Amino acid sequence: MAKCFSLMLLLASIWTTKLLVHGSLRVEELSISAPCRIVGVTLVNKKTTQQLNFTEAQEACRLMGLTLASKDQIEAAWRSGFETCSYGWVADKFLVIPRILPNPKCGKNGMGVLVWRNSLSKKFLAYCYNSSDTRINSCSPEIITTKDPIFNTHEATYTTEMITSDSAYSASSTVAPYSTTPTLAPTSALASTSRRKRKLICVTEAFVETSTISTETESYIENKAAFKNEVVGFGGM
């Protein structure tokens, strides 16, 4: 009977303590010491000088939508550059302070995640953890590098063929795939092709002129012969 009474008294005291904690803390009274979370860890405190015991620290993190961080989570944040100058409660039921640089006013000039075991009723800050964080620094934008298969940055070798008159010239070059300036054939080669084309035109013109002269000569001979026949006929009469 005495054991049952003691158990009921213990449960009642725990329930009363939780009720007092729920009634004594409000979100409006809490603030986050740093605007950015490092690997999900941040430091929560009350806006008043009176801070949080261990039970209140758990409740404060819950009201902020977080959980009380563990020492391992604090160490992960410390390795990513997280440090403070305040002792705070962690889920392991002791106080820690993460230090990167030694400072006589912070953790007695120590470095690392320093542990201080104290009474759970003592008032300190609370280290809270956000399990949904995927970035090291919650304030830094996430950079995602993707490779677009449409754009190929590799160089490509292609051949440009130019046909001028009766000759073909090709030039091969290795440039970026979006370059619009091909390597052309030498200027001297194009110049020789142009000269060859003009030479053919001259031959054609000479042929036309020869044909014209020949036609006119034949016409002149025929007219002369006809005139001669007419003269002979006239004399015959």
Image: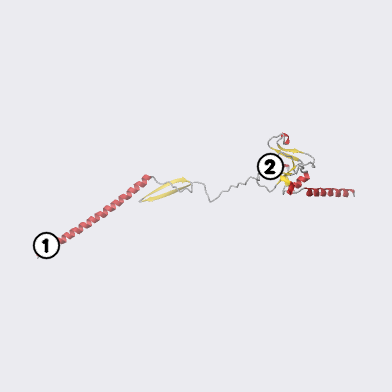
Residue denoted by label 2: 77
Q: Give the mark, 2 or 1, whose residue is nearer the N terminus.
A: 2
Q: 119 or 163: which is nearer to us? A: 119
Measuring from the top left, give residue 137's x and y in whole percent.
65, 44
Name the amino acid type tagged 1: Val
Residue denoted by label 1: 232
Mark 1 surroundings within 10 Å by alpha-carbon count, few (fewer than 14), some (14 through 19), many (20 or more): few
Q: 161 or 51: which is nearer to us? A: 51
Q: Which residue corresponds to the image point at 18% horizontal and 60% vertical from the top-left? A: 223
Measuring from the top left, give residue 186's x and y in whole percent.
39, 45
Measuring from the top left, give residue 201's x and y in whole percent.
30, 52
Q: Which residue corresponds to the image point at 12% horizontal and 62% vertical from the top-left? A: 231
Q: Which residue corresponds to the image point at 26% horizontal and 55% vertical from the top-left? A: 208
Q: 19 or 200: which is nearer to us? A: 19
What kind of element bears circle 2?
helix
| Left or right of 209 in this view: 123 | right
Q: Which residue lies furthest to the bottom in this view?
A: 237
Q: Which residue corresponds to the image point at 28% horizontal and 51% vertical from the top-left? A: 203
Name the amino acid type tagged 2: Ala
Coloured how? secondary structure
- Locate the C terminus by quadrant: bottom left
